[in-house]
Image (cartoon, grey):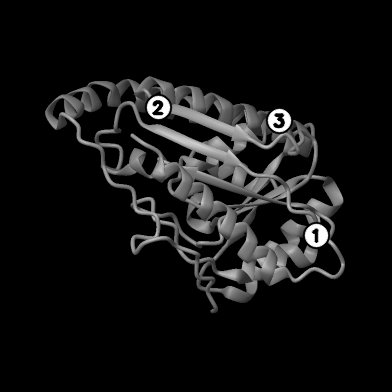
Amino acid sequence: MARLAGRGRGGDNGAVPDAPVDHARARWIDWLMTPPFLVAFVGTLLLFDPLQRVARLFGQRPQEYVAGWLQIALVFVFRIAGTRLVMERDPAVAPGTPYLILANHQSMFDIPIFGAAFFRNFPKYVSKRELARWIPSISYNLRRGGNAIIDRSDREAATRAIRALGAQVRERGVSAVIYPEGTRSRDGRLGPFKPAGALALFEEAPETAIVPVAIDGSWRLLRFNLFPIPFGTRVRMHIGAPIPRSPEEDRLWLLHEARARIEQTLEDWRSESP
């Protein structure tokens, strides 16, 4: 499948050098705060799982609100580990408006951050099917919340699921979040975009504006696979200006433009003085 190369400055394509730290001190704090974080994280998932199921009895929208509150609660849980979320939002991005949200992807923790940031836009996700099993709250929301669950080995079925998500954006006024890299970055580098899924969304929701979103720092939260969780991680998020649509648009150019904006934001952040 074709991939979109990025406009890079230098040869690292956005790698993030680690700042000097007192590793012994940092690791001691990490281990100290990991147990309360995990207790609160798992407890939140266990609490919201039955709440979503009850809300779903009253319809899709009540379940979506509960799922949104779940994401907000998880963002607060991150504060136990000293995680700081710094968010920049273009004023043109309005609550209650459907968008096609294209973003880079660094961690499974991106999901609650996006859910909290776009609470009133009712974000739906393109997710691999493995996440739709056995995880309290998260798996239920993926299965019953109107998200696109895909099998990466079945490209045709995955495209159909993404098109169905695009139809939801048109018909119900929800938003779709897609990570065109296709997988999360383990070190913060921005990978090439795989166009098929995003282009299917563009085609299925041709009047819905595209919002590019850059996120950085969340990859550090899983550096040690939660054992321990790093304390004091700063996560930055930039919600860019919507890219309008038109009947004469070049959809591949739109994807290039969204990636270029994300890459530029990452480069700007990483060029700042520490």
Around disc 1, counting alpha carbons within 10 Å, would you say few (fewer than 14), some (14 to 19), or many (20 or more)? many
Q: Residue 32 or 2: which is nearer the viewer? A: 2
Q: What's the residue type where badge 1 is placed?
A: Ala
Q: What's the residue type where badge 2 is placed?
A: Thr
Residue bearing the label numbered 3? 65
Mark 3 residue element: helix
Q: Is any part of residue 45 visible from this angle? A: yes
Say which mark, if any, is on residue 83. 2
Where 154 sits versus 174, above or below? below
Q: Is residue 74 left or right of residue 274?
A: right
Quarter occupied by the C terminus: top left
Q: Are marks 1 and 2 in contact (CB under 8 Å)?
A: no
Marks 3/1: CA–CA distance: 23 Å
**Which residue appears at 74% of the width and 53% of the height?**
243
The image quarter in which residue 29 lies: top left
Q: Residue 253 or 273: which is nearer the viewer? A: 273
The image quarter in which residue 108 lies: top left
Q: Is residue 164 left or right of residue 233?
A: right
The image quarter in which residue 93 lies: top right
Residue bearing the label numbered 1? 205
Q: What's the residue type where badge 3 is placed?
A: Tyr
